[in-house]
Amino acid sequence: MFGKGIFKGLKITIGHLFEKKVTQQYPEERPVLPARFKGSFDLNVAKCIACGLCSNACPNHVIKIESVKDENNKKKLTGYKMLAEQCLYCGFCVEVCPTKALQWNHDYERAKFFRDEVNLDLYAKYTPSPDDDKKDIPEKNVKPEEKQDESAKAS
Amino acid sequence: MLKTQELTLNMGPQHPSTHGVFRCVLKLEGEYIRECVNHTGYLHRGLEKLAEARTYSQFIPYNGRLDYVSGMLNELSYVQTVEKLMGITEEIPERAQYLRIILGELQRLASHAIYVGTFALDMAGFTPFMYAFRDRDRMLDLIEAASGQRLMPNYMRIGGVAADLDEEWFKELEILMNDMPACIDEYDGILTGNEIMRARTIGVAPVSAEMALSYGFTGPNLRASGFDYDLRRDEPYGIYDRFKFDVPVRKDGDTYDRYCIRVAEMRESVKIIKQAMKDIPEGPIMAKVPKVIKPPVGEAFHRIENSKGHLGFHIVSDGSTKPYRTRIYSPCFVNLGFLPTTAKGLHLMDLVVALASIDIVLGEVDR
C-alpha cells in the first residue's frame, strides 16, 4: 500500500513524543564530565622540576619554559607559558610529566574576548598551598620508577 | 520560440549540503546539469608536510584532523603503519588489540550515524537526523570517557593504546550495544520504507561494479555496487580474523543501496563489538617500544577499512626520528572523482543526494 512507509515513520515519531526529553539545557544544566576530560591545564609549580620534557613532547611548540639554576645546581622554574591558541589538546605534555605537576582540569568554558587572553601563564596562575613543602620530600623517592612508567606510556 | 540560456551555478564552498567546504561549478540547462567541475582544496592544511616536521608519535593527534568524524580509525591506520615499519606488529598486547577493535568499531558506528542523519537531512528529513545524533552522542560520550576528547581522541599509541578502560566503561558500552539494534531499527523504520525517500533515491546516480572499480571506489561505496570486498575479512589487520561478521553487499549501486549498506554495516559493527567485549583479556596495554622511535631505513604501506573506504598510509623512513615522507591515501578524495561523470544529466536536487550518498568529509579530501 502506498504511504505505508510514511505511516510507519510517523508511528515511531509519535512514540517519541511522550518520552523523556534527551536534550540537555546547557547553561542551566551542567554536563557531567568524565575523569579524563581534557579541559585546560593546571601546573603545580612546587612539584615541577623544570625538566622540559613537556615542551619537547609537544607537537606544536606550545610550551615555553624559563628556569634558573640555584646554588645546588638544581633547576628552579621561573616561568611557564602556554600558547593555548596553538594547542592541539593532545595531552602528550601531561602524559610525559615525570612528577605529575602538569594536569588537566575540567575548565571547558574557554571563550575569550581578546586573543591574548587565550594564552595561559601557568606560573603566574599558580597559588602556593601549605601542602607544597610536604609533597616535595616523598616526590624525590618516587621519581625514578614513575619516570620509567611514563616513558613506556609516552612513547 | 523560447530563448534558452545555459546557466553557470556555483555550489559551495559555503553550502550546507556540500558537507564542508567542497565547491563544484555546475552548468545548468533548466534544472538539469550539463557539466560539473569539482574544486577542492579549501581545507588544505598540508598535513603530509606537517608529518615530516614531527616525530612519529607527535603526528598521532593530527590524524583526528583528517576525517574528523572517524578519528580513532585514522589513528589506528597511522599507528599500524608505523608498527609495520618498525616490525613490531606481532608484539602488540592482546588487550590493546581488543581495545583498538572496540573503539574503532564504535567510531565506525558514530561515523555511519552521521551518514544516516545527514543523508536524511539533505532530503529535508530532519527527524532522522536528530535520532542519529542522539545515538551518536552516546558513542562520543564513551570515546570521551576513554580518551578525554570527543572528536580528536589521540587514543592510539605506537605499540598499544594510551589508557586502560575499567569495568564501569564496559558496562556503559554494554547498555549502548543492547540499545543499538532498536535504534538502528528506528532509522530503518523512519527512512528505509519511506515512499518519499525511495522516490528520491532509487535509481539516482547508479554506479556499476566496473565503473566503481575503475574510479577506485573502496569501502561501503564499492560494496553497494556489488563488489564483495572488505579488508576486515579479506586482508585482516590487527585481530579482525577472530570475529564472525557478515559483509553486506548490494547490487545496483544507486544512492539507495549506498544508504542501505551503511545501515546494514552498523548492525555488523554492533556484532563485532559484542564479540570483542566477551573475549577481551586482562593484561598490559602497551608493548615495549623505545621512547625515541627510530624505525629502520625503509618504507611501509598499510591500509585499513575506514568508515569511508580504504585509508592508507605510506611512510618512508630515513632512519631518523622524523619520517622522510608521509603519504595519506584518502578514500573520500578518490570517491569524489565519480561526481563529474555521474552528475551529467542529473537533476539539481539529485546532485545533492548523490553527493551525500558517497559520504565525503572534506578534512580528508583536502588533507
Image (cartoon, helix red, strand yellow):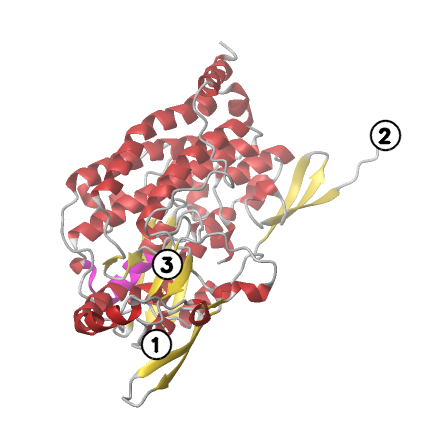
- Residue at the bottom extreme? A71
Inspect the image, locate mark 3, and give the three-letter code of the amino acid beneath it. Trp
Q: Secondary structure at mark 1?
A: loop
Q: Secondary structure at mark 3?
A: strand
Q: Which is in the foreground here, disc 1 or disc 3? A: 3
Q: Work out whether residue A112 can be spotted.
A: yes
Residue at horizontal 34 percent and vertical 62 percent from the top: A103
Residue at horizontal 52 percent and vertical 39 percent from the top: B356
Residue at horizontal 46 percent and vertical 22 percent from the top: B190
The N terminus of chain B sits in image quarter: top right
Of residues B224 and B156, the one drawn nearer to the viewer in this rendering = B156
**Main secondary structure found in the magenta portion:** helix
How far separated are the C-alphas under marks 3 and 2? 72 Å
Q: In the drawing, does residue B334 fall left or right of residue B96?
A: right
Q: Which residue is mark 1?
A: A52
Instruction: Determine which quarter of the picture holds residue B30.
Output: top right
Neighbour class for label 3 at 10 Å: few (<14), some, many (≥20)? some
Q: Which mark is residue A104?
A: 3
Q: Which residue is mark 2?
A: B1
How far separated are the C-alphas under marks 1 and 2? 79 Å
Q: Work out whether residue B230 can be spotted.
A: no
Inspect the image, locate mark 2, and give the three-letter code of the amino acid beneath it. Met
Magenta region: which residues?
B77-89
> Does the segment drawn in magenta span residue B78?
yes
Residues indicated by labels 1 and 3 sit on the same polypeptide chain: yes
Count of numbered marks: 3
Residues indicated by labels 1 and 2 sit on the same polypeptide chain: no
Residue at horizontal 54 percent and vertical 29 percent from the top: B126
Neighbour class for label 1 at 10 Å: few (<14), some, many (≥20)? some
Q: Position of residue B44 (x, y in %)?
A: 53, 60
Q: Position of residue B224 (x, y in %)?
A: 40, 35
Up/down of A36 relative to B198, above or below: below
